[in-house]
Image (spheres, helix red, strand yellow):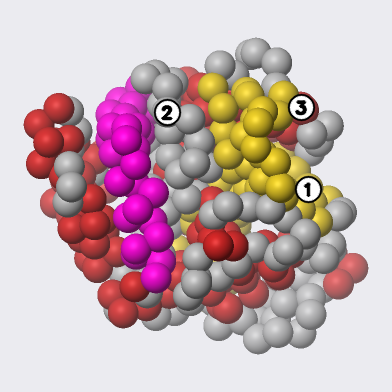
Amino acid sequence: MTAFSPVSQSGQSKGSMDVPGISSFPPEFRSDQMHTNGTSLYIRTGGNGDAVVLLHGYGETGDMWASLAAELVHDHTLVVPDLRGLGLSCRPEGGYDKKTQAHDIAGILDALKIKQADLITHDIGNMVGYAFAAQYPERVKRFVIMDAPLPGVGPWDEIVRNRALWHFSFQGPDAERLVAGRERIYLDRFWNEFSADPRSFGEASREHYASLYAQPGAMHAGFNQFAAFDQDASDNKAFLALGKLTMPVLAVGGEKSFGTTMAVVMRAAALDVTEAVIPNSGHWLMEEQPAATIAAVRAFLAPKSEGTIGPTTAAGQFSSATMKK
């Protein structure tokens, strides 16, 4: 793993903070382009307290976590990268297997002198998060994983037979030619078909993310995330052969998306799994049902002295998520 250091850009986040109509990161957040593991990632950091790392998925960037960051910033130190090749991060040709991307995250935490963190992930971020937790279990205190499968784990073979997931195999030069100049159309399909109500994924967010994915090389890098799934499945099976994760895991599914299947996936990979289902939500939990999703996360992260996981958060906010062991 190469050394980590900040490069040119510093200051306030240039992601959602500058886009009217979508949630903004708190003003105390700063952003940096940071070298790690042979590439450079765009990182947002802010807050004070126990560390939390938030990893986004495909069709979004780290900007998806702005409203959760605003909730956690008062008592947590937050680290919010754009994954390799996505958003404002650099786009190397290789390294899109999730085992390698886990080393990207480890390098960032090393540079920030963070030894241990809670991990919150969504979609492809789940896959990077699992690879990180499997390779660096001592660095993950708790793991919140949201609404996407893990290659090679649990019911993966059954899940990938779902025709709605044809995009898992959609990549290559001709696929890139088909979507060139039509990035918004391609991404609208994800936001429409995988939400409980497409209206919940707002126009401002759609324009913002479509513009980021229309940058030179961005769709190529995004397709590479999916092209690595076979390698990811092989790596994950090797991780599982060494044993299941032992840290507490909250497996969150949207009622209209993965639902309870998210917990089924994680019980194949971890020993201590709590299940949460967010009502009236599809895949895009932070866009569709942010309050219920944030409440479920807050309840899981609350110190034991503040109460156990249940229908209310530590702050007494009502959570409509169904949560159980």
Q: Which mark is drawn over residue 23? A: none
Towards the viewer: 236 or 94:
94
| Disc 1 element | strand
Inspect this view and state whether residue 66 appears. Answer: no
Three-letter amino acid code at the position of disc 3: Asp
Q: Which residues are magenta?
A: 204-233
Residue 279 percent location from the top left of the image: 44, 79
Q: What quarter of the picture does the C terminus occupy?
A: bottom right
Q: Which residue is the extreme one toward the front?
A: 8
Residue count near mark 2 (Cα–Cα under 10 Å), binned few <14, some 14–19, many ≥20: many
Instruction: Residue at 37% x, 20% y: name it.
Output: 93
Residue ID for mark 2:
91
Where residue 87 sits, quadrant-wise, is: top left
Q: How many marks?
A: 3
Real-space CA distance between mark 2 and mark 3, rounded to the nearest whole angstrom: 22 Å
Q: Earlier in the sequence, mark 2 or mark 3?
A: 2
As shown in the figure, which amino acid type bears the numbered disc 1? Answer: Ala
Q: Which residue is mark 1?
A: 51
Instruction: Name the magenta segment's main secondary structure.
Output: helix
Side of 306 where 135 appears, left or right: left
| Mark 3 element type | helix
Q: Earlier in the sequence, mark 3 or mark 1?
A: 1
Q: Is residue 308 above or below residue 250?
A: below
Determine the CA span between mark 3 and mark 1. 13 Å
Residue under circle 3?
A: 110
Name the one closer to the observer, 20 or 219.
20
Amino acid type for the residue under numbered disc 2? Arg
Question: How packed is label 3: few (under 14 Cα within 10 Å), some, or many (20 or more)?
Answer: some
| N-term mark: 2 or 1 | 1
Q: Is residue 221 covered in magenta?
A: yes
